[in-house]
Image: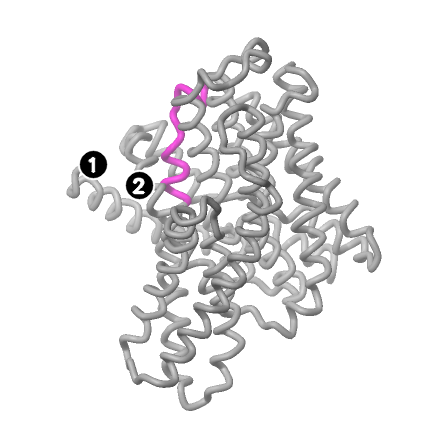
Amino acid sequence: MELAVSIGYLALLLISGAFIAKVGEKLGIPDIPLFLIFGLIVGPFLNIIYPSYAQNIFEYVANLGLIIILLAGAFEMRWIVLKRVLNTVLKLDTITLIITMLISGIIYNIILKIPFLSPVGYLYGAITCATDPATLMPIFSKSDIDPKLAITLEAESVFNDPLGIVVTTIVLTTMGLGTSLNPVISFLSLALGGIILGILGGKIFEMLFLKCDFKEYIIPLLIGLAFFLWYFGDKIFPTLTGYQISGFMAVAIMGLYLGNTLTKYHHKTRYIESMVRFCEELSTIFRILIFIFLGASISLVILEKYWVVGLLCALGSIFMARPLGVFIATSIPPANSLKEKIYFALEGPRGVVPAALSATVYGIIKTHSSSIPATIVKYIPPQEIAGSILVATFITILLSAILEASWAEPLYKKLFK
């Protein structure tokens, strides 16, 4: 893509995003759903931004933006609060996620009238089972919601990405489209590797922060280190070992470590505040770009063909799969209160990670369709698998973001006040 075209798109979206956010603020409407709808309008409906261009830009914007959003959000999490909700977070990140994947997969297979145990549906379920920190963190940062509830859902969204990636890889393998790496080792590499890498990155930054007076250059050091952790986990480590470390988790853990460690160095408060403020402002810019480009990246032809299937799958995932997963997981002792269960069940928006996974899977299926076993394609052809999953994932993201961003605060007030 031409540089001038890219800069033109960025100019249009940032200026439009600022006005859209202002309108949303006046009307009392969250900005994320408005960004998504605006992306649909300037993308597939008006073709001001061609979907192919939006898809190319989205890959970069989504990854860079999520790194910044995770760093800023985790930096402001307090370990003393996180410890109180860790048991719930672990249940949501394992039991809820797996049940959400399975129920979503069953619903997809029923809607498309393919065999109950076909892996195609479970591929959709795997892609959409992880919740989204890029949606949740901005919502909670602007609302008066109990920090205990907010941190539970934020931590769930930060730490469920590795399992979502692993189950997607496992299902792809059953369809002849993935490598047959050991799934247990893959998960340990992603999750534990991300934790270890994040703590190591945090300690290195802490040492440099105390030993060297970088002054205003401490901000590029922080951002650069966050980018490097992601690059090491997602690119360098897989080249060396064949297994991946979750770069996103590493960034989140580093943010969590630094946010709970640097605050005790009172003589450095000015620099800490400048880092937090910079990351928050950069997060705002990326939030605009991520969700508008996401809306603009969908093809109108594919959307028209599969929107009914996608809508039914999205409704099933949001209102059946997620609530069932939450209620089962949070009923395990120590059980959560009914009000907490309802809030967790109805507040699990999907976003950047499912979007990136669906785009990747779409490309894999289109490129390697001949690798899919005949036992699968005799019920549903590869192009239909690719298109239906892409649209179903997009509508799941769109619908969950619109609904759950809009009712986050009203639902909290209805349940708890």
73 vs 93: above or below: below
Q: Marks 2 and 1: in contact by CB < 8 Å? A: yes
Locate residue 111, reporting x and y percent.
64, 19
Locate residue 154, reporting x and y percent.
58, 58
Locate residue 299, reporting x and y percent.
38, 25
Q: Is residue 406 at least partly visible in the picture? A: no
182 vs 117: above or below: below
The amino acid type of the residue labelled 2 equals Ile
Give the residues drawn in magenta, as a range. 291-304
32 vs 399: above or below: below
Q: Tell me if residue 259 is in the magenta stretch.
A: no
The amino acid type of the residue labelled 1 equals Met
Q: Nearer the viewer, residue 259 or 140?
A: 259
**Furthest residue toward right:** 333
Q: Which residue position holds label 1?
A: 1
From the viewer's perspective, tell me whether residue 251 is left or right of residue 85.
left
Q: Overall secondary structure of the magenta stretch?
A: helix
